[in-house]
Amino acid sequence: MKQHVELRNHPAELHKFRLRLSISAGFVLILFLILYARFYYLQVMQQEHYQTLAEANRISISPLVPNRGLIYDRSGRILAQNYSAYTLEVIPSQIKDLEATLNELADIIEITPTDRQRFKKLLKESKRFKSLPVRSRLTDEEIATFAVNRYRFPGVEIKARVLRQYPEKEIVSHIVGYISRINDQDLDQLENNGELHNYRGSQHIGKIGIEQSYEKQLHGITGFEEVETDAAGRSIRVLSRTPPLSGSNLILSLDLGLQEAAEKAFGDRRGALVALDPNNGEVLAFVSKPGYDNNLFIGGIDQENWNLLNKSIDRPLNNRALRGVYPPGSTFKPFMALAALELGKRTPEYSMSDPGFFSLPGVDRRYRDWKPGGHGRVDLHKSLVVSCDTYYYSLANDLGIDNIHSFIGQFGLGKRTGIDIEGEVAGLLPSSAWKMSQYKQKWYAGDTISVSIGQGYNLATPLQLAFATMVIANNGKAYAPRLVKQIQNSQTGEVEDIPAKLLYSLNLKPKNLEVVKNALVDVTRPGGTAAKAGANAAYTFAGKTGTSQVIAIKQGERYNEKAINERHRDHAMFIAYAPAENPKIALAVLVENTGTGGSTAAPIARQVFDYFLLGKPSEAAIAQLAEPAADHDHHHHHEHL
Amino acid sequence: MDDIKKIWHFLTRYIDSFLLIGLLTLMAVGLIVLYSATGANMARVSNQVINMLIALVIMWLVANIPLQQIMRLALPMYILGLVLLVGVALFGEINNGARRWLNIGVTRIQPSELMKIAIPLMMAWYFDKHEITLRLKDYIGATVLLLLPVLLILRQPDLGTAILIASSGFYVLFLAGLSWRIIAGLMVTVAGSLPVFWTVMHDYQRRRIITLLDPSQDPLGAGYHTIQSSIAIGSGGVVGKGWQNGTQTQLDFLPEQSTDFIFAVFSEEFGLMGNTVLLLLYLLVIGRCLVITANASTQFTRLIAGSITLTFCTYIFVNMGMVSGILPIVGVPLPLISYGGTSMVTMLLGFGILMSIQTHPKLVKT
């Protein structure tokens, strides 16, 4: 070691250090004495008190689980309810041979193979000292039989439980969602949010849909009871009781009748429909077909049913309205038309001659219109009514992608609408900056051409399209879509309205809006692409058809529906609102793999409107659904770029 | 025979046998309690034996390194620790609402653990370097060195570790001769900043403090731990319920009974008599450490030894204090007893340093 180190070892300094060290040692001794005093207090002075608490857990604190709030549609029809039932439950850690016990139980109470499968799955997912249901909804007879045989089954008990039920099943499963048993992940989350204490005794938690997003309101507040028990575990008396507070009831804006009408209009086809009230953003109908029976999930789904749902090619668990992204197709055109007028790139009077294709200046390549030979002279009004592509190809080139992106972005495409259930996806409204960050490539003029008719990189959810339609219908007011309209305190019965949330208002010129909206009305009149669906409507009906491409067609080939695998056929799209002069409902419809919007999607919209505005399905619309659709609409099939 | 002697000499040359016997006794107690706490789970016990063996090897290695070389590690270790802590703040994984872990590709590490050793090393090194001219600005410099990692750890947030690291640094300051006036000033500042702390704390931390003041306010939630561990300790009485006979333990009323709350298990089964023996064992180890500290020959070794010893005491006090309900629950293990490899390694590494100080030739005073 170096010399200077030794020099520093000054006696005075060492003395000072040792003094400090002694002070520290004294301090440590004091701390230890404090600890010892605490131990003395607990183990000698209070020993008897704690002995009583510990011995056979003389005082046990048991949670009192609150009743979960109910869910209603807007007219008070029940969507989620509770019922009391007796369940047969076992605590695995208290049973030596589980398999043998189950077999013996099956001799006196019916336990189906499905029950067993579900129980096995639960067993794997749960802690061994938790009480797990083997069977629910025991009959009085079964309860009596078990009571007689009870001595044979330690660790098996019959418990009175409040269970959840969804009477409407598939029809509202994508909205209501479901509750299911609390798993480790849920526990972690509850702990992080500091809510774990409120879930002692609770077995279920909302996993998806309204049940998940409004978990806080629905669950309620857990009460507890301090019970003095004797050594055998029997309660002697209740020392104190804090009653639980039931969760709040939710009243949705959903109109169950309308939802049913929409479901019926879809029949067996896959797709989605979202209907909003343009005056406040309330969700009136929210369909994703196919649905699934959400009751299956409550007690834990068995493997067989899970495979059926999860592996089905129809993907019933996929919420298409909220999470399905599709190219909007020609339903994009009204927004393009409005952009043209608002940004001064077109006047209503301007017209062009449509030869049936469009080429960029100096490039050979042809972007074809859906109609071979073209539509002749086309102005803005006609471009929407007949859904002319060429008009929008040339318009797109004049607007440029970034103008399109920023103008149409105002209608909510490319971002989440902020609906009050979780899991919404944002879709995609492309821009040159987006392409650069995503693909490290610059934007080409050709990219804009396909975007103009809702193809290319364009992707939107049915919810987003309904939102955009609502903004046009109400002349620029963007309301946040919401499913829950009112919350009812189940203690006091008081109903609290959730006010409409106006996100922003667009400043659009009334005369421009009028031009576009007039054209949308003519779409449903003779000569328009949805004329059939609009025939004899008792109200003015505005809409726009679209076709969403599933696969790309090579340059020089034509789309031939019959030659293509059913799952690769185009999706039909339709956006609409009614009555046109004072809209009460705005919607977007998507029907998967059925071709064109005018023939399959628009008639569904018609039925929904008829139900909502007139209160009954129109015979004309039903007749039209029955007959095979004559192809009045068009296909956009683009070459893969 | 000669060979055996040589090997024995090689193995024990730099080992302080008094300290080692004390540590091994405590670890043996730990294993006995763990066996009961896990419900006779031999897998967990042998796992802990492996943890202990690894930690003992590390202790032996460290004891064999002369302090001058360890001293050279002070600055690099501190800087590495700081960089990793910044890394955690920027890219750390969020777990239970706190950002404490850093994924470095091969494995996940918790850099605050490294800081438990790096801070006393760094600060002792710093004072050693500035020894001749120790002035106020040197203390300020040392305080900054200490505050950087402590603030980063507080941000994670990990209140328990931040307190332990802050106190290990404070011990160095104190032993280096920080004037009483400044210490008094610091105390006033800390007391004054408590309300500020309260506002930046996470909800769960606040709840723990409220619960400490009145556990019955939330018997199902945050108060549950304190109530159940107090019952365990109190019902143990003077002689305890006997090994593997604690009802609180065996019926699973005690939370985290093999880690942070293992002392409640011990206390329930061995009573006040057991507690007396355990505290005395700890005091023996602490006493030996104090002797080593008092005899250390350089400023660096004195400060590092003193800080390690006092931090060890802090662990014991904070853990027993929270389990017996006089301190809030901050997640500090009981040294040498609680289940877990990381804290075992950190502890024995510290003792390795103490042994190195004691057993390597000391400088002759001039």
Image (cartoon, rainbow, N blue to C red):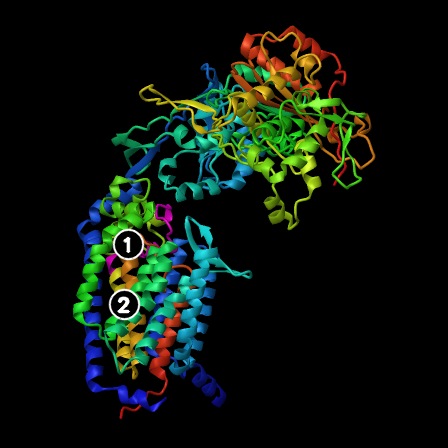
A555 to A597, vertically: above or below: below
Q: Tell which of A415 and B146 is nearer to you.
A: A415
Residue A285, x across and y down, in percent: 54, 20
Residue A538, x across and y down, in percent: 59, 7
Give the residue type that dot 1 points to.
Answer: Met
Residue A196, x across and y down, in percent: 38, 40
Q: Quadrant of residue A100?
A: top right
Q: In the rendered image, is residue A295 in sight?
A: no
Give the residue type that dot 2 points to.
Answer: Phe
Marking on residue B25: none
Q: Which residue is mark 1?
A: B322
Q: Tell me which segment is drawn in magenta.
A: B250-274
Q: In the rendered image, is residue A283 in sight?
A: yes
B206 to A268, vertically: above or below: below
Single out the mark in the foreground, 1 or 2.
2
Subunit of label 2: B
Instruction: Look at the numbered disc 2 and give the secondary structure of its residue.
Output: helix
* Disc 1 crowd, CA 10 A, few/some/many (<14, 14-19, 20+): many
Looking at the image, the residue that sits furthest to the bottom is B366
Q: Quadrant of residue B21?
A: bottom left
Q: Tell which of A243 and A534 is nearer to you.
A: A534
Residue in the picture at 31% in, 75% down: B305
Callouts 1 and 2 in the same chain: yes
Subunit of label 1: B
Marking on residue B170: 2
Residue in the picture at 44% in, 38% down: A130
Instruction: Look at the numbered disc 1 and give the secondary structure of its residue.
Output: helix
* Disc 2 crowd, CA 10 A, few/some/many (<14, 14-19, 20+): many
